[in-house]
Image (spheres, coloured by chain):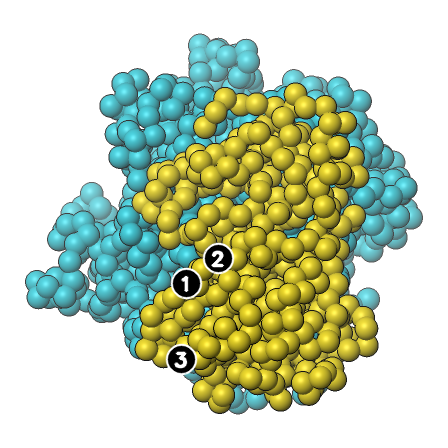
Chain colours: A yellow, B cyan
Amino acid sequence: MSEATAGYVLLEDGSRFDGILCGATEGGVGEVVFNTAMTGYQEAVTDPSYAGQIITFTYTMIGNYGVSAGAMESGAAHARGVIMRDARNNSDAASAEGGWLDWLEANGVWAITGVNTRALVRHIRDKGAMRGGIFPASLSTGDAMARIEAEPTMAGSDFASQVSPEAPIEHDGSGPHVVALDTGIKASIVNQFLERDCRVTLLPCLTPAEEVMAREPDLLFLANGPGDPAAVSAVTETVRELIGTRPMVGICLGHQLLSRAVGLETFKLPFGHRGSNHPVKDLETGVIEITSQNHGFAVVGPDGKGTIENDEPVRWQTGHGEAVLSHINLYDRTVEGLRLPDAKAMTVQHHPEAGPGPRDARHLFDRFLDLAKEG
Amino acid sequence: MPKREDIKRIMVVGSGPVVIGQAAEFDYSGVQACKVLLEEGYEVVLVNSNPATIMTDPEFATRTYVEPLLPGPVAAIIEKERPDALLPTLGGQTALNLAMDLSADGTLEKFGVELIGANRDAIIRGEDREVFRQVMTEAGIRIPWSITVESVEQALKELDEGDASLPAIIRPAFTMGGQGGGIAETRDELIEVVSKGIAASPIGQVLVEESVIGWGEFELEVMRDRNDNVVIICSIENVDPMGVHTGDSITVAPAQSLTDPVYQSLRDIAIAVIREVGVETGGSNVQFAVNPADGEIVVIEMNPRVSRSSALASKATGFPIAKMAAKLAVGYALEEIPNDITRATPASFEPTIDYVVTKIPRFAFEKFPGADEKLSTYMQSVGEVMSIGRTFRESFAKALASRELDSRPEVPESDNGLLNAIATPTPGRIDLVLAAFERGLTVEQVHEQAKIDPWFLRELELLATDGDGTGGLERIYNSVDTCAAEFEAATPYYYSSHEPEGSPSEIRRGEKESVVILGAGPNRIGQGIEFDYCCVHAAMTARECGRDAVMVNCNPETVSTDYDTSDRLYFEPLTLEHVLAVCEKEQPEGVIVMFGGQTPLKLAEGLKEAGINLLGTPVEAIDAAEDRGKFGALIDRLGIKPPPYGTALSAAEAEEIAAGIGYPLLVRPSFVLGGRAMEICYSTGDLKAYLDRHVKASPEHPLLLDRFLENAIEVDVDALCDGEEVFVAGIMQHVEEAGVHSGDSACVLPPMSIGQEMIDEIKQATTAIALELGVIGLINIQYALAGGELYVIEANPRASRTVPFVSKAIGIPLAKVATRIMLGQKLADQDLPEFTGDHVSVKEAVLPFSRFQGADSVLGPEMKSTGEVIGIGPDFPTAFGKAQAAAGVSLPESGAVFISVTDTDKAAATQLAAQLHDLGFEILATTGTAQAISRMGTPVRAINKIAEGSPHVVDMIEEQHCDLVINTPTGSGARADGYEIRSAAIRHGIPSVTTLTGASAAVRAMAARANGSGEVKSLQELHAR
């Protein structure tokens, strides 16, 4: 860990929050978001869905138990930066293979600590997630602002194709063959399928439909991933071609892409859902699950509004039959999941695989595979 | 699912007197429950024997019964009130055990009362260790190996057969706070701890369990609703690893050292546990041990009810667990209840926090000389502080400051000595750890000894060497919002924190004038829940009087730190620095320092100097009452006598003054709480020994010497004064002998054996003193009556410990009236009725001796009780009997009574013996007393004094051939014999009475019970006007 250097966070509306640089100290810009989970910092930073973003951790003590290979959600760090209140570089924990700040530095993740993260979060909550950056105090706010303004906004940004693998990745298994369009899949999702003996193939997300079908999938999987679902129209097009051919499930970005493929709209949430404590009601069972969340966009309801009034399985008419609301977020009543019976498809907005976060919804992978069996 | 319409009337059971392991937190949870149930339109029948609680205020229930929490009296209330349901999960172990008794004896079935919150089977699955073990094993949840035993022989057999191994933990079944349990590392210790545990368990059963000492200890607070939705409210990590009772451990929230996968495993297991145990609705607490080496998890125990930890979790997160538990118990689902704090989101979520919470327990070993200070698996702390800070260091430093310690542990000079001391968990260990780091010892060295997780040690090292990390930052106030600022908070619950300059504060301060009420800080002996009761009343009254009530306190167990109690709650240390910072933000009309005991009073001078307006009695009056010279001159002007006294500034002067006053003498340092270091000296030798042992009298620390009036009747008076007029609210006559601290003495209101003339004299004296001091609010005066003369012992112009008792006895909320006076109203405006009720109220103290191994169990001028109970009846014997029963003293219905009294008491004792004989008791007495009794024609069996050799009186008690001890000691010699007798009686749970008035009261209570006067009346009926 290098010598303490003064730095600051600047947002595109001019708000400034001072702190001390740590991790990779050159600084840079991205969309500034916040995550309210109290554990799982390394999992978050290595989740490809955070590509292009700077994560503000609302919990104040970050780095307590170090880092380990087991906590990697992908092969690399994807978040551009992290903003913290009181970062730690400890590696005493038995499971720790290194210190958090050393790891951030080694992985080129910009980091700043000592920031009044609560004030920053309240600002984003009130004004919405926005572009911003982590900068050394030696850089003038004018220069910093110029760098922020040069960054494209998250709405309209395609990060998915950047985090997608260049070549197919195959995992052996004796069970159903899950073929995924990999827009930045988390290791925990793959692991959930593997734990259920699936054979898993991850394809570059721009793989054409016929090549996908040539893999003979039992289940088509649309992965999580970063960015604006509206900006990855090529993938949406592929999904549109594939839907109905084989059972299909999607998580997070995959849920949004499938929705868009059947004609539903998506919109940008004011500050997104990122954390481990959102209650989601499964309208098929009435059970409320505490879920892991990481998304900035959501699917528009059947009446054109962003929220659903009652805990009822409202329906959309699509080109592939009805889409039925299967899950609802009880925090802000946004769409959390769909089922398309005619297309043998189902999706969820949250992260049933956990990693990090609660495992309440992991049983959905069984539901996914039941769908595959029906197919 | 909406709320249940099939039940109308719900009985809520409180937790009784404050004892170690069960304190004010159950007043907090009970008050929340009562408020919710009333709001929902249910009728609430409340039962609790503790008068110092807010829940027993008549406005918190439809019917309030201050009766013993025993099956008999509660069954009588059930028969009278016919509740549809009983909610047993909010009154601690006491309520749960009582519900089990009422279920087992058929009362609930007979009167058609449904247990809500947790049913009988769930309680058994959670509480009976053997059943719990089976349920967990069947569910595949790893718990430490354990064997239930009911005898020492059985425990040794299991050890010899290899089914058990050492070290092992011993936990008695159905006890609270781990009472009677312990750790056995050797065969001899196993024998000792198992036999103690069997004695402590109401069902004579203990669990011998695998020791996971040194593992990390964690707790999760869990809630479940009718729809089987389960949420985790809070995770708590113990700084002290396994081996120290969680109530005695320093704990932090959220868990700091757990990775996400391990935390999620704890979460999954906690959810499985609450489901397997079958707690239908409400909160539970699941405790885990986690092996730091490999993350292996075992479940230690679960409480199928709201607990001390859930009170802490509620304060730590802002999620009101008890309130939610009450709503869930009447049928609501979590998703149907709005989150109290955000109002916009439902309660079916998991709070997330963006700060660190620290809890540090507060101990009272200094009150129990001889007690072993080693902390173990049974709880010994008497209170706790909580603090909130944005970082661990800030939070921890605030908690350390909140402790208000009188002294710090001595730090051994050598490094080895220090490290050795750190190896043993003690109340002062944390200070030693910090001292070690200040001295440059390493995390590795300290970890080797203490086994505290290195994460904590690195933080503590930073704290010791680099401070709390707030340097160069600005103090601001954040709100506690359950959601880390993801949603806007509607509830004004604040903590201070340090952030870079220019950071915003979140205080929402309207235009109204505010009144800042300073709380009492951590519960301790001498300053307990009574003061929190007064503070809560002050807050309620300030609001009624059109002000914003602002509370400052750091005690998580209390009603005062419920964010519902005041308009703004600042969860802060009660130090001048923190209080002034709050005042700077609040710009209050004034600050009330009169209700929180010594804690806020100590700040009065500093606040005044800073220009803060103190409401009520001026600081000068407090000084005039506490300064012997000034007070002596004042009462002299009024023609009122004190016992002869003097103030010594040196040891030599003390002896000189003592000779002038004459012995026996009451000796104490000035400005003390709860009679700390107060003793009676019968001779120059006693005085010299006291001076050697205690305070070195000096000009800075004057020593007070008073003539101790033997055989005097002590009287406590609580009065209100508005500067013009005085209302003498309650005159209480002590039942115990003079010389027992008023806090430890039983007392009766109205007085039983004081003539009207003397009562008038007491009223006149009280009025004169209050007016002369210039009291604006409450005053408590202690008098002694000796030889027909009235002596003033001391005056305290502030809320006293007896305020809640008097308020309940006479039906006038004194602290509320006092607050109105402080805010400018006159007594004349309030039209207070003279007490004319024909009922008698008795307060009895509850003592913690059984918790402190090796401690001397005798009462004296230093207060030792942790709590109190009230007994109300149509006459003194009935009220006294109820108070004894409520305090856990079971006066026998048959058997043998041992009597040994001083010569002056012999005549009266023979009368008692005759009465006891008529009631069917066998009379045992030492030679002298036996002769006197025999001469009056009462059959008596003479037994030996200790000095006369075995079999003597203590042998009789040890062998449990005796069911009641009446022993009146006077003077030091006689007292010594009494010590042995009393200690033996306490060890074996045999009631012992040390005064003739007490004995007479007990005998009359026993007779009254034999005649069966068992009527129960609610406070609402007693005080109906």
Circle 1: residue type: Ile
Instruction: Give the residue drawn at x 38%, y 75%.
Output: A198
Which residue corresponds to mark 3? A176
Mark earlier in primary sequence (1, 3): 1
SS assignment at label 3: loop
Q: Where, quadrant-wise, is the N terminus of chain A in this rendering? A: top left
Instruction: Give the residue drawn at x 76%, y 74%.
Output: A301
Mark earlier in primary sequence (2, 3): 2
Circle 2: residue type: Pro
Label 3 neighbour load within 10 Å: few <14, some 14-19, many 20+: some
Which residue corresponds to mark 2? A165
Q: Nearer the viewer, residue B601 or B408?
A: B408
**Chain ID at mark 1:** A
SS assignment at label 1: strand
Which residue corresponds to mark 1? A169
Q: In the drawing, what numbered circle is on residue B780? A: none
Q: Nearer the viewer, residue B379 or B341?
A: B341
Q: Are marks 2 and 3 on the same chain?
A: yes
Q: Nearer the viewer, residue B145 or A246?
A: A246
Q: Position of residue A375 (x, y in %)?
A: 49, 88
Whether residue B935 is visible to the viewer of this picture, yes or no, is: no
Query: Which quadrant of the view contains residue B59?
Result: bottom right
